[in-house]
Image (cartoon, helix red, strand yellow):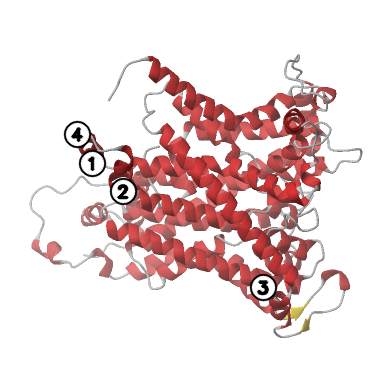
Amino acid sequence: MTVSPTARTAAPEPLAPGPPEPARRRRPSMLSRRGDRSFAWMLIVPVLVFFVVLNVVPLLWLAGLSFYRHTLISGRPPTFIGLDNYRAILTSSDLWGSFGTTFTFMALSVGGATILGALLGFLFWGSAKMPGRRLALTLLFTPMLLTPVSVGAFFRLMLDPNFGILNYFAGLVVGHKVDFLAQSSTAFPAVVLIDIWMWTPFMTLITLAALGSVPAAEMEAAAVDRLRWTTKLRRVILPNAKFILMLGILLRTIDAFKTTDQILLLTRGGPGSATELLGLRLYRLGFDSFDMGSASALAIVALLAAIGFTSLYLYVLNLKAEKT
Amino acid sequence: MTTGAGPRRVAYYALLWAMSLLFFSPVLWIILSAFKSPAQILAKDPVVIFEPTLANLADAFGRTEFVSTLINSIVLSSVAVVIAVVVSFLAAYSFSRFKPPGTDFLMFLLLSVRMVPAAATIIPIYLMFVALGWKNTHLGLIAFYAMFSIPFSLWILRGFIDGISRRFDETALVNGAGRLHVVFRVVLPQVKPGLMAAFVFNFIFVWNDYLFNYTVGGAATNNVPVTLAAGMYNVGGADWAFISSVTTIYLLPIVVIVFFFQKYLLVGMTFGTVRGEV
Protein backbone atom coordinates (compact mmCIF):
# COMPACT_ATOMS: atom_id res chain seq x y z
CA MET A 1 0.00 0.00 0.00
CA THR A 2 1.36 3.38 -0.91
CA VAL A 3 0.01 6.52 0.59
CA SER A 4 0.81 9.48 -1.53
CA PRO A 5 1.62 12.76 0.18
CA THR A 6 -1.23 14.37 -1.70
CA ALA A 7 -3.78 12.34 0.23
CA ARG A 8 -3.61 14.85 3.02
CA THR A 9 -7.22 15.86 2.75
CA ALA A 10 -8.37 12.34 3.59
CA ALA A 11 -10.59 12.43 6.63
CA PRO A 12 -9.02 10.98 9.76
CA GLU A 13 -10.31 7.47 10.17
CA PRO A 14 -10.87 5.78 13.48
CA LEU A 15 -8.24 3.27 14.46
CA ALA A 16 -8.83 0.01 12.65
CA PRO A 17 -10.55 -2.54 14.84
CA GLY A 18 -9.66 -6.19 14.59
CA PRO A 19 -6.30 -7.85 13.99
CA PRO A 20 -3.93 -6.16 11.55
CA GLU A 21 -3.41 -7.92 8.25
CA PRO A 22 -0.26 -10.02 8.07
CA ALA A 23 0.89 -8.20 4.97
CA ARG A 24 0.97 -4.93 6.85
CA ARG A 25 2.73 -6.45 9.77
CA ARG A 26 5.50 -7.75 7.58
CA ARG A 27 6.27 -4.29 6.31
CA PRO A 28 9.75 -3.64 7.78
CA SER A 29 9.31 0.03 8.46
CA MET A 30 7.33 2.91 7.17
CA LEU A 31 10.60 4.53 6.31
CA SER A 32 11.51 2.29 3.44
CA ARG A 33 8.52 3.06 1.35
CA ARG A 34 8.68 4.74 -1.98
CA GLY A 35 8.30 8.51 -1.94
CA ASP A 36 9.60 8.80 1.59
CA ARG A 37 12.99 10.02 0.56
CA SER A 38 11.62 12.88 -1.43
CA PHE A 39 9.19 13.70 1.37
CA ALA A 40 12.03 13.70 3.89
CA TRP A 41 14.04 16.11 1.77
CA MET A 42 11.05 18.30 1.05
CA LEU A 43 10.64 18.97 4.76
CA ILE A 44 14.28 19.94 5.14
CA VAL A 45 14.47 22.29 2.17
CA PRO A 46 13.42 25.49 4.02
CA VAL A 47 16.00 24.97 6.76
CA LEU A 48 18.63 24.09 4.17
CA VAL A 49 17.92 27.30 2.26
CA PHE A 50 18.41 29.35 5.43
CA PHE A 51 21.50 27.36 6.28
CA VAL A 52 23.18 27.71 2.91
CA VAL A 53 22.29 31.36 2.27
CA LEU A 54 22.91 32.71 5.76
CA ASN A 55 25.45 30.28 7.22
CA VAL A 56 27.47 28.54 4.53
CA VAL A 57 27.89 31.50 2.19
CA PRO A 58 28.88 33.94 4.97
CA LEU A 59 31.18 31.33 6.44
CA LEU A 60 33.00 30.84 3.14
CA TRP A 61 33.10 34.61 2.75
CA LEU A 62 34.62 34.89 6.22
CA ALA A 63 37.16 32.15 5.54
CA GLY A 64 38.16 33.76 2.25
CA LEU A 65 38.40 37.23 3.71
CA SER A 66 40.71 36.02 6.45
CA PHE A 67 43.44 35.63 3.81
CA TYR A 68 43.07 39.20 2.57
CA ARG A 69 44.02 42.65 3.72
CA HIS A 70 40.70 44.43 3.62
CA THR A 71 40.06 47.68 5.44
CA LEU A 72 36.70 49.22 4.66
CA ILE A 73 37.68 52.84 5.17
CA SER A 74 40.84 52.63 3.04
CA GLY A 75 38.77 52.36 -0.13
CA ARG A 76 41.35 49.98 -1.61
CA PRO A 77 40.29 46.61 -2.99
CA PRO A 78 41.21 43.61 -0.82
CA THR A 79 44.71 42.27 -1.41
CA PHE A 80 45.65 38.66 -0.92
CA ILE A 81 48.19 38.26 1.88
CA GLY A 82 47.99 34.54 2.60
CA LEU A 83 48.34 33.61 6.24
CA ASP A 84 49.57 37.02 7.37
CA ASN A 85 46.40 37.80 9.34
CA TYR A 86 46.72 34.54 11.25
CA ARG A 87 50.41 35.12 11.80
CA ALA A 88 49.60 38.58 13.16
CA ILE A 89 47.03 37.08 15.55
CA LEU A 90 49.38 34.43 16.85
CA THR A 91 52.21 36.88 17.44
CA SER A 92 50.25 39.84 18.77
CA SER A 93 50.71 40.14 22.51
CA ASP A 94 47.67 42.39 22.48
CA LEU A 95 45.51 39.58 21.22
CA TRP A 96 46.91 37.03 23.60
CA GLY A 97 46.08 39.53 26.31
CA SER A 98 42.52 39.57 25.03
CA PHE A 99 42.39 35.77 25.18
CA GLY A 100 43.79 35.88 28.69
CA THR A 101 41.20 38.43 29.79
CA THR A 102 38.44 36.33 28.23
CA PHE A 103 39.50 33.13 29.95
CA THR A 104 39.97 34.83 33.31
CA PHE A 105 36.54 36.37 32.89
CA MET A 106 35.02 33.00 31.96
CA ALA A 107 36.62 31.19 34.90
CA LEU A 108 35.60 33.79 37.49
CA SER A 109 32.17 34.48 36.12
CA VAL A 110 31.16 30.87 35.47
CA GLY A 111 32.71 29.74 38.75
CA GLY A 112 30.93 32.42 40.74
CA ALA A 113 27.58 31.90 39.06
CA THR A 114 27.86 28.14 39.49
CA ILE A 115 28.62 28.27 43.20
CA LEU A 116 25.99 30.87 43.99
CA GLY A 117 23.46 29.31 41.64
CA ALA A 118 23.95 25.83 43.08
CA LEU A 119 23.56 27.16 46.63
CA LEU A 120 20.35 28.92 45.67
CA GLY A 121 19.16 25.82 43.85
CA PHE A 122 19.66 23.68 46.94
CA LEU A 123 17.92 26.35 48.98
CA PHE A 124 14.90 26.35 46.66
CA TRP A 125 14.79 22.56 46.57
CA GLY A 126 11.84 21.47 48.63
CA SER A 127 10.01 24.76 48.38
CA ALA A 128 7.31 23.36 46.10
CA LYS A 129 4.55 24.43 48.47
CA MET A 130 5.88 27.93 49.06
CA PRO A 131 3.23 30.61 48.60
CA GLY A 132 3.99 32.77 45.58
CA ARG A 133 6.85 30.51 44.49
CA ARG A 134 6.29 31.16 40.82
CA LEU A 135 6.43 34.92 41.34
CA ALA A 136 9.54 34.62 43.51
CA LEU A 137 11.28 32.57 40.81
CA THR A 138 10.21 34.98 38.07
CA LEU A 139 11.69 37.88 40.06
CA LEU A 140 14.84 35.85 40.63
CA PHE A 141 15.13 35.27 36.86
CA THR A 142 14.78 38.95 35.88
CA PRO A 143 18.56 39.63 35.72
CA MET A 144 18.90 37.27 32.76
CA LEU A 145 15.70 38.50 31.11
CA LEU A 146 16.74 42.13 31.05
CA THR A 147 18.20 43.42 27.78
CA PRO A 148 22.01 43.34 28.18
CA VAL A 149 22.05 46.92 26.91
CA SER A 150 19.92 47.97 29.87
CA VAL A 151 22.17 46.04 32.22
CA GLY A 152 25.23 47.80 30.86
CA ALA A 153 23.57 51.22 30.83
CA PHE A 154 22.09 50.98 34.29
CA PHE A 155 25.10 49.62 36.05
CA ARG A 156 26.97 52.56 34.68
CA LEU A 157 24.51 54.80 36.45
CA MET A 158 24.57 52.73 39.64
CA LEU A 159 28.37 52.76 39.68
CA ASP A 160 28.61 56.44 38.82
CA PRO A 161 30.93 58.21 41.30
CA ASN A 162 28.50 61.11 41.71
CA PHE A 163 25.00 59.71 41.46
CA GLY A 164 25.35 55.92 41.70
CA ILE A 165 23.59 54.05 44.45
CA LEU A 166 26.35 51.43 44.60
CA ASN A 167 28.87 54.20 45.02
CA TYR A 168 26.70 55.61 47.77
CA PHE A 169 27.08 52.30 49.61
CA ALA A 170 30.79 52.22 48.77
CA GLY A 171 31.02 55.65 50.35
CA LEU A 172 29.38 54.32 53.52
CA VAL A 173 31.70 51.30 53.66
CA VAL A 174 35.13 52.60 52.65
CA GLY A 175 34.54 56.25 53.43
CA HIS A 176 35.02 57.64 49.94
CA LYS A 177 33.50 57.15 46.52
CA VAL A 178 35.23 55.02 43.91
CA ASP A 179 35.13 55.49 40.16
CA PHE A 180 34.84 51.76 39.58
CA LEU A 181 34.76 51.75 35.80
CA ALA A 182 37.63 54.21 35.34
CA GLN A 183 40.37 52.08 36.93
CA SER A 184 41.38 48.72 35.57
CA SER A 185 41.83 47.35 39.10
CA THR A 186 38.10 47.79 39.78
CA ALA A 187 36.60 47.76 36.27
CA PHE A 188 37.35 44.10 35.63
CA PRO A 189 35.98 42.84 38.97
CA ALA A 190 32.90 45.02 38.43
CA VAL A 191 32.30 43.49 35.01
CA VAL A 192 32.72 39.98 36.46
CA LEU A 193 30.38 40.64 39.39
CA ILE A 194 27.70 42.04 37.11
CA ASP A 195 27.95 38.94 34.94
CA ILE A 196 27.65 36.72 38.01
CA TRP A 197 24.57 38.65 39.06
CA MET A 198 23.07 38.18 35.58
CA TRP A 199 23.70 34.47 35.30
CA THR A 200 23.43 33.03 38.80
CA PRO A 201 19.68 32.61 38.21
CA PHE A 202 20.44 30.42 35.19
CA MET A 203 22.59 28.12 37.30
CA THR A 204 19.81 28.05 39.90
CA LEU A 205 17.42 26.94 37.17
CA ILE A 206 19.86 24.21 36.11
CA THR A 207 20.46 23.08 39.71
CA LEU A 208 16.73 22.82 40.33
CA ALA A 209 16.36 20.66 37.21
CA ALA A 210 19.35 18.54 38.25
CA LEU A 211 17.98 18.02 41.75
CA GLY A 212 14.58 17.24 40.29
CA SER A 213 16.20 14.36 38.40
CA VAL A 214 17.21 12.61 41.64
CA PRO A 215 14.74 9.74 42.06
CA ALA A 216 12.47 10.29 45.06
CA ALA A 217 12.85 6.63 46.04
CA GLU A 218 16.60 6.99 46.48
CA MET A 219 16.14 10.09 48.61
CA GLU A 220 13.63 8.25 50.78
CA ALA A 221 15.97 5.31 51.15
CA ALA A 222 18.72 7.70 52.19
CA ALA A 223 16.38 9.24 54.75
CA VAL A 224 15.48 5.80 56.12
CA ASP A 225 19.17 4.95 56.42
CA ARG A 226 19.73 8.26 58.21
CA LEU A 227 22.66 9.09 55.97
CA ARG A 228 24.62 12.17 56.85
CA TRP A 229 24.09 15.18 54.61
CA THR A 230 27.58 14.93 53.07
CA THR A 231 27.20 11.21 52.40
CA LYS A 232 23.80 11.80 50.88
CA LEU A 233 25.25 14.50 48.65
CA ARG A 234 28.13 12.32 47.52
CA ARG A 235 26.36 9.00 47.15
CA VAL A 236 22.81 9.88 46.15
CA ILE A 237 22.47 13.41 44.86
CA LEU A 238 25.61 14.03 42.83
CA PRO A 239 25.63 10.75 40.86
CA ASN A 240 22.13 11.56 39.65
CA ALA A 241 22.46 15.29 39.23
CA LYS A 242 25.95 15.62 37.80
CA PHE A 243 25.11 15.36 34.10
CA ILE A 244 22.56 18.13 34.09
CA LEU A 245 24.90 20.26 36.20
CA MET A 246 27.76 19.63 33.76
CA LEU A 247 25.59 20.52 30.78
CA GLY A 248 24.55 23.71 32.53
CA ILE A 249 28.10 24.70 33.37
CA LEU A 250 29.22 24.04 29.80
CA LEU A 251 26.38 26.10 28.36
CA ARG A 252 27.22 28.93 30.72
CA THR A 253 30.89 28.67 29.71
CA ILE A 254 30.04 28.93 26.02
CA ASP A 255 27.77 31.87 26.74
CA ALA A 256 30.42 33.63 28.81
CA PHE A 257 32.80 33.18 25.89
CA LYS A 258 30.33 35.16 23.76
CA THR A 259 29.73 38.05 26.20
CA THR A 260 29.70 41.34 24.30
CA ASP A 261 26.63 43.56 24.63
CA GLN A 262 26.63 44.65 28.26
CA ILE A 263 30.39 45.30 28.30
CA LEU A 264 30.12 47.37 25.14
CA LEU A 265 27.77 49.64 27.09
CA LEU A 266 29.58 49.44 30.42
CA THR A 267 33.21 50.09 29.53
CA ARG A 268 33.63 49.58 25.78
CA GLY A 269 36.54 47.33 26.71
CA GLY A 270 38.32 49.97 28.75
CA PRO A 271 39.98 51.38 30.65
CA GLY A 272 42.85 50.56 28.32
CA SER A 273 41.97 47.00 27.42
CA ALA A 274 41.19 45.81 30.96
CA THR A 275 37.74 44.50 30.06
CA GLU A 276 38.24 43.80 26.36
CA LEU A 277 36.84 40.31 25.96
CA LEU A 278 37.28 38.42 22.72
CA GLY A 279 33.74 39.14 21.49
CA LEU A 280 34.22 42.83 22.09
CA ARG A 281 37.67 42.84 20.53
CA LEU A 282 36.23 41.19 17.42
CA TYR A 283 33.47 43.73 17.24
CA ARG A 284 35.83 46.67 17.63
CA LEU A 285 38.29 45.27 15.13
CA GLY A 286 35.50 44.99 12.57
CA PHE A 287 33.38 48.03 13.31
CA ASP A 288 35.65 50.53 15.04
CA SER A 289 38.76 50.02 12.90
CA PHE A 290 36.92 48.39 9.95
CA ASP A 291 39.83 45.98 9.59
CA MET A 292 37.73 43.17 8.14
CA GLY A 293 40.66 40.94 7.19
CA SER A 294 42.13 40.66 10.69
CA ALA A 295 38.65 40.50 12.20
CA SER A 296 37.78 37.58 9.91
CA ALA A 297 40.89 35.67 10.86
CA LEU A 298 40.10 36.19 14.53
CA ALA A 299 36.49 35.17 13.89
CA ILE A 300 37.70 31.90 12.36
CA VAL A 301 39.77 31.26 15.50
CA ALA A 302 36.69 31.98 17.62
CA LEU A 303 34.65 29.64 15.44
CA LEU A 304 37.16 26.83 15.97
CA ALA A 305 36.94 27.43 19.72
CA ALA A 306 33.15 27.28 19.49
CA ILE A 307 33.32 23.99 17.57
CA GLY A 308 35.54 22.64 20.35
CA PHE A 309 33.07 23.73 23.01
CA THR A 310 30.15 22.23 21.11
CA SER A 311 31.95 18.91 20.70
CA LEU A 312 32.64 18.82 24.42
CA TYR A 313 29.00 19.62 25.14
CA LEU A 314 27.73 16.84 22.89
CA TYR A 315 30.26 14.45 24.38
CA VAL A 316 28.81 15.04 27.85
CA LEU A 317 25.31 14.81 26.42
CA ASN A 318 26.13 11.38 25.00
CA LEU A 319 27.55 10.26 28.34
CA LYS A 320 24.25 11.26 29.90
CA ALA A 321 22.25 9.41 27.25
CA GLU A 322 24.34 6.27 27.76
CA LYS A 323 23.89 6.36 31.47
CA THR A 324 20.13 6.85 31.58
CA MET B 1 9.52 15.39 56.55
CA THR B 2 7.87 18.33 58.22
CA THR B 3 4.68 19.81 56.94
CA GLY B 4 2.46 22.61 58.13
CA ALA B 5 3.33 26.18 58.88
CA GLY B 6 5.80 25.91 61.70
CA PRO B 7 8.02 28.87 62.47
CA ARG B 8 10.93 27.14 60.74
CA ARG B 9 8.90 26.85 57.56
CA VAL B 10 8.00 30.52 57.72
CA ALA B 11 11.63 31.48 58.25
CA TYR B 12 12.65 29.24 55.33
CA TYR B 13 10.13 30.83 52.98
CA ALA B 14 11.13 34.28 54.16
CA LEU B 15 14.75 33.46 53.34
CA LEU B 16 13.82 32.31 49.83
CA TRP B 17 11.81 35.46 49.22
CA ALA B 18 14.67 37.56 50.52
CA MET B 19 17.05 35.87 48.07
CA SER B 20 14.73 36.44 45.13
CA LEU B 21 14.28 40.07 46.09
CA LEU B 22 18.02 40.52 46.53
CA PHE B 23 18.59 39.47 42.93
CA PHE B 24 15.63 41.52 41.82
CA SER B 25 16.75 44.68 43.65
CA PRO B 26 18.87 46.23 40.83
CA VAL B 27 15.94 45.69 38.48
CA LEU B 28 13.63 47.20 41.08
CA TRP B 29 15.92 50.22 41.23
CA ILE B 30 15.53 50.68 37.47
CA ILE B 31 11.75 50.36 37.76
CA LEU B 32 11.66 52.87 40.63
CA SER B 33 13.75 55.28 38.56
CA ALA B 34 11.15 55.13 35.83
CA PHE B 35 8.71 56.80 38.24
CA LYS B 36 11.10 59.48 39.47
CA SER B 37 11.81 62.94 38.19
CA PRO B 38 15.21 63.35 36.44
CA ALA B 39 16.46 65.33 39.44
CA GLN B 40 15.51 62.50 41.80
CA ILE B 41 17.30 59.95 39.60
CA LEU B 42 20.50 61.98 39.74
CA ALA B 43 20.25 62.98 43.42
CA LYS B 44 23.47 62.85 45.42
CA ASP B 45 21.89 60.64 48.05
CA PRO B 46 19.64 57.89 46.68
CA VAL B 47 15.97 58.84 46.80
CA VAL B 48 13.94 55.94 48.15
CA ILE B 49 10.72 57.63 49.20
CA PHE B 50 9.20 59.87 46.56
CA GLU B 51 5.96 60.76 44.91
CA PRO B 52 5.76 58.60 41.78
CA THR B 53 5.24 60.35 38.48
CA LEU B 54 4.00 58.91 35.21
CA ALA B 55 5.63 61.70 33.21
CA ASN B 56 8.58 59.55 32.06
CA LEU B 57 6.39 56.74 30.78
CA ALA B 58 4.06 59.20 29.04
CA ASP B 59 7.07 60.96 27.56
CA ALA B 60 8.48 57.66 26.25
CA PHE B 61 5.24 56.75 24.50
CA GLY B 62 5.15 60.24 23.05
CA ARG B 63 8.51 59.84 21.34
CA THR B 64 8.52 58.46 17.82
CA GLU B 65 11.99 56.98 18.25
CA PHE B 66 10.61 54.74 20.99
CA VAL B 67 7.24 53.88 19.46
CA SER B 68 8.65 53.04 16.04
CA THR B 69 11.44 50.91 17.48
CA LEU B 70 8.98 49.14 19.78
CA ILE B 71 6.90 48.22 16.74
CA ASN B 72 10.08 46.97 15.05
CA SER B 73 10.93 44.89 18.11
CA ILE B 74 7.49 43.29 18.13
CA VAL B 75 7.42 42.62 14.38
CA LEU B 76 10.99 41.34 14.10
CA SER B 77 10.86 39.02 17.08
CA SER B 78 7.45 37.53 16.46
CA VAL B 79 7.66 37.09 12.67
CA ALA B 80 11.24 35.79 12.63
CA VAL B 81 10.71 33.35 15.48
CA VAL B 82 7.42 32.03 14.08
CA ILE B 83 9.13 31.38 10.73
CA ALA B 84 12.04 29.70 12.49
CA VAL B 85 9.81 27.48 14.62
CA VAL B 86 7.70 26.41 11.62
CA VAL B 87 10.61 25.49 9.34
CA SER B 88 12.47 23.91 12.25
CA PHE B 89 9.47 21.77 13.09
CA LEU B 90 9.29 20.42 9.52
CA ALA B 91 13.00 19.67 9.42
CA ALA B 92 12.97 18.23 12.94
CA TYR B 93 10.25 15.80 11.90
CA SER B 94 12.27 14.70 8.92
CA PHE B 95 15.49 14.39 10.97
CA SER B 96 13.74 12.41 13.66
CA ARG B 97 11.80 10.02 11.44
CA PHE B 98 13.87 9.59 8.28
CA LYS B 99 17.33 10.53 9.51
CA PRO B 100 18.65 11.47 6.05
CA PRO B 101 22.41 11.11 5.60
CA GLY B 102 24.34 13.94 7.25
CA THR B 103 21.68 14.67 9.86
CA ASP B 104 24.00 14.48 12.85
CA PHE B 105 26.68 16.51 11.13
CA LEU B 106 24.22 19.22 10.15
CA MET B 107 22.78 19.38 13.66
CA PHE B 108 26.29 19.68 15.06
CA LEU B 109 27.28 22.38 12.60
CA LEU B 110 24.14 24.41 13.26
CA LEU B 111 24.78 24.30 16.98
CA SER B 112 28.44 25.29 16.59
CA VAL B 113 27.57 28.26 14.43
CA ARG B 114 25.22 29.40 17.17
CA MET B 115 27.99 29.19 19.77
CA VAL B 116 30.42 31.74 18.30
CA PRO B 117 30.64 35.30 19.63
CA ALA B 118 28.07 37.49 17.91
CA ALA B 119 30.69 39.66 16.18
CA ALA B 120 32.11 36.64 14.32
CA THR B 121 28.67 36.02 12.81
CA ILE B 122 28.10 39.68 12.10
CA ILE B 123 31.20 40.45 10.05
CA PRO B 124 30.42 38.33 6.96
CA ILE B 125 26.68 38.92 7.30
CA TYR B 126 27.30 42.65 7.39
CA LEU B 127 29.44 42.58 4.23
CA MET B 128 26.95 40.32 2.50
CA PHE B 129 23.93 42.42 3.47
CA VAL B 130 25.67 45.59 2.27
CA ALA B 131 26.61 43.93 -1.03
CA LEU B 132 23.10 42.61 -1.64
CA GLY B 133 21.28 45.70 -0.40
CA TRP B 134 19.61 43.77 2.44
CA LYS B 135 20.97 46.02 5.16
CA ASN B 136 18.32 48.12 6.89
CA THR B 137 15.46 46.08 5.40
CA HIS B 138 12.87 44.26 7.48
CA LEU B 139 13.08 41.20 5.26
CA GLY B 140 16.83 41.00 5.68
CA LEU B 141 16.65 41.19 9.46
CA ILE B 142 13.74 38.77 9.68
CA ALA B 143 15.67 36.28 7.55
CA PHE B 144 18.73 36.78 9.72
CA TYR B 145 16.90 36.38 13.03
CA ALA B 146 15.04 33.36 11.68
CA MET B 147 18.36 31.78 10.74
CA PHE B 148 19.67 32.57 14.20
CA SER B 149 16.64 31.00 15.89
CA ILE B 150 16.67 27.82 13.79
CA PRO B 151 19.49 25.88 15.52
CA PHE B 152 18.00 25.92 19.01
CA SER B 153 14.46 25.39 17.70
CA LEU B 154 15.65 22.44 15.68
CA TRP B 155 17.41 20.89 18.67
CA ILE B 156 14.45 21.45 20.96
CA LEU B 157 11.89 20.09 18.51
CA ARG B 158 13.90 17.08 17.42
CA GLY B 159 14.22 16.08 21.06
CA PHE B 160 10.48 16.32 21.48
CA ILE B 161 9.64 14.45 18.26
CA ASP B 162 12.13 11.70 19.14
CA GLY B 163 10.12 11.26 22.30
CA ILE B 164 6.93 10.47 20.40
CA SER B 165 6.55 6.84 19.44
CA ARG B 166 6.61 6.05 15.74
CA ARG B 167 3.58 3.89 16.36
CA PHE B 168 1.48 7.03 16.14
CA ASP B 169 2.78 7.73 12.65
CA GLU B 170 2.42 4.15 11.54
CA THR B 171 -1.08 3.71 12.91
CA ALA B 172 -2.21 6.83 11.13
CA LEU B 173 -0.58 5.78 7.86
CA VAL B 174 -2.03 2.31 8.05
CA ASN B 175 -5.41 3.89 8.45
CA GLY B 176 -4.98 5.80 5.26
CA ALA B 177 -3.90 9.18 6.51
CA GLY B 178 -1.62 11.22 4.29
CA ARG B 179 1.96 12.17 5.09
CA LEU B 180 1.13 15.77 5.86
CA HIS B 181 -1.82 14.68 7.95
CA VAL B 182 0.60 12.70 10.10
CA VAL B 183 2.95 15.64 10.44
CA PHE B 184 0.38 18.29 11.26
CA ARG B 185 -2.49 16.41 12.87
CA VAL B 186 -0.78 13.53 14.64
CA VAL B 187 2.68 14.74 15.64
CA LEU B 188 2.25 18.52 15.84
CA PRO B 189 -0.36 18.51 18.63
CA GLN B 190 1.92 16.35 20.76
CA VAL B 191 4.92 18.67 20.57
CA LYS B 192 3.13 21.84 21.61
CA PRO B 193 5.35 22.21 24.72
CA GLY B 194 8.41 21.99 22.44
CA LEU B 195 6.98 24.63 20.11
CA MET B 196 6.28 26.88 23.10
CA ALA B 197 9.76 26.38 24.53
CA ALA B 198 11.40 27.13 21.18
CA PHE B 199 9.23 30.19 20.72
CA VAL B 200 9.70 31.62 24.22
CA PHE B 201 13.45 31.19 24.30
CA ASN B 202 14.17 32.54 20.83
CA PHE B 203 11.66 35.34 21.28
CA ILE B 204 13.50 36.55 24.37
CA PHE B 205 16.77 36.37 22.49
CA VAL B 206 15.66 38.38 19.47
CA TRP B 207 13.72 40.79 21.68
CA ASN B 208 16.85 41.59 23.68
CA ASP B 209 19.34 41.59 20.81
CA TYR B 210 21.34 44.73 20.28
CA LEU B 211 24.51 44.03 18.32
CA PHE B 212 22.97 42.43 15.23
CA ASN B 213 20.28 45.01 14.93
CA TYR B 214 22.71 47.85 15.38
CA THR B 215 25.16 46.66 12.74
CA VAL B 216 23.00 44.85 10.19
CA GLY B 217 19.90 47.01 10.61
CA GLY B 218 19.47 50.70 10.17
CA ALA B 219 17.13 53.57 10.91
CA ALA B 220 14.14 51.73 9.43
CA THR B 221 14.60 48.49 11.36
CA ASN B 222 16.15 49.48 14.69
CA ASN B 223 14.70 47.88 17.78
CA VAL B 224 14.35 49.21 21.31
CA PRO B 225 17.81 48.17 22.60
CA VAL B 226 19.35 50.33 19.87
CA THR B 227 17.23 53.27 21.04
CA LEU B 228 18.34 52.55 24.60
CA ALA B 229 21.98 52.57 23.64
CA ALA B 230 21.46 55.78 21.69
CA GLY B 231 19.91 57.31 24.81
CA MET B 232 23.22 56.69 26.56
CA TYR B 233 25.14 58.84 24.12
CA ASN B 234 22.74 61.74 24.10
CA VAL B 235 24.04 65.23 23.63
CA GLY B 236 24.14 66.68 27.14
CA GLY B 237 24.50 63.37 28.94
CA ALA B 238 22.58 60.12 29.20
CA ASP B 239 18.82 60.51 29.39
CA TRP B 240 18.22 58.36 32.47
CA ALA B 241 14.52 59.06 32.83
CA PHE B 242 13.99 57.85 29.27
CA ILE B 243 16.32 54.84 29.66
CA SER B 244 14.70 53.66 32.89
CA SER B 245 11.13 54.05 31.67
CA VAL B 246 11.87 52.34 28.34
CA THR B 247 13.69 49.50 30.14
CA THR B 248 10.70 49.04 32.42
CA ILE B 249 8.20 48.96 29.56
CA TYR B 250 10.43 46.65 27.55
CA LEU B 251 10.97 44.17 30.40
CA LEU B 252 7.29 43.84 31.26
CA PRO B 253 6.16 41.53 28.39
CA ILE B 254 9.13 39.21 28.95
CA VAL B 255 8.40 38.95 32.68
CA VAL B 256 4.75 38.19 31.95
CA ILE B 257 5.74 35.51 29.41
CA VAL B 258 8.20 33.90 31.83
CA PHE B 259 5.71 34.02 34.68
CA PHE B 260 3.12 32.12 32.67
CA PHE B 261 5.45 29.84 30.75
CA GLN B 262 8.06 29.26 33.43
CA LYS B 263 8.34 25.55 32.78
CA TYR B 264 9.37 26.18 29.17
CA LEU B 265 12.27 28.44 30.10
CA LEU B 266 14.54 25.60 31.17
CA VAL B 267 13.83 23.54 28.04
CA GLY B 268 14.46 26.58 25.89
CA MET B 269 17.66 27.73 27.52
CA THR B 270 19.21 24.27 27.24
CA PHE B 271 17.77 23.76 23.73
CA GLY B 272 15.81 20.74 24.83
CA THR B 273 18.70 18.75 26.23
CA VAL B 274 17.56 19.26 29.80
CA ARG B 275 13.97 18.74 30.76
CA GLY B 276 12.36 18.58 34.11
CA GLU B 277 10.25 20.26 36.71
CA VAL B 278 11.64 23.37 38.30
SS class, disc 1: helix
- Asked whether residue A175 is in view, the answer is yes
Nearer to us: label 4 or label 2: 4
Q: CA distance from mark 1 to mark 2?
A: 10 Å
Q: Name the kind of residue labelled 2 in the image.
A: Asn
Q: Position of residue A32 (x, y in %)?
A: 26, 70
Q: Secondary structure at mark 4?
A: helix
Q: Are the numbered discs 3 and 2 placed on the same chain, yes or no?
A: yes
The residue that disc 3 covers is A62
The reply to whether callout 3 and callout 4 are in contact (CB within 8 Å) is no
Q: Chain of mark 3?
A: A
The answer to whether the residues at label 1 and label 2 have Cβ atoms under 8 Å apart is yes
The kind of residue tagged 3 is Leu
The x and y percentages for residue A233 are 33, 43
Q: Which residue is mark 1?
A: A218
Q: Is A44 situated left or right of A214 in this image?
A: right
Query: Left of A118 or right of it: where is B160?
Result: left
Q: What distance separates the C-alpha of mark 4 from that of mark 1?
A: 10 Å
Q: Nearer the viewer, mark 3 or mark 4?
A: 4
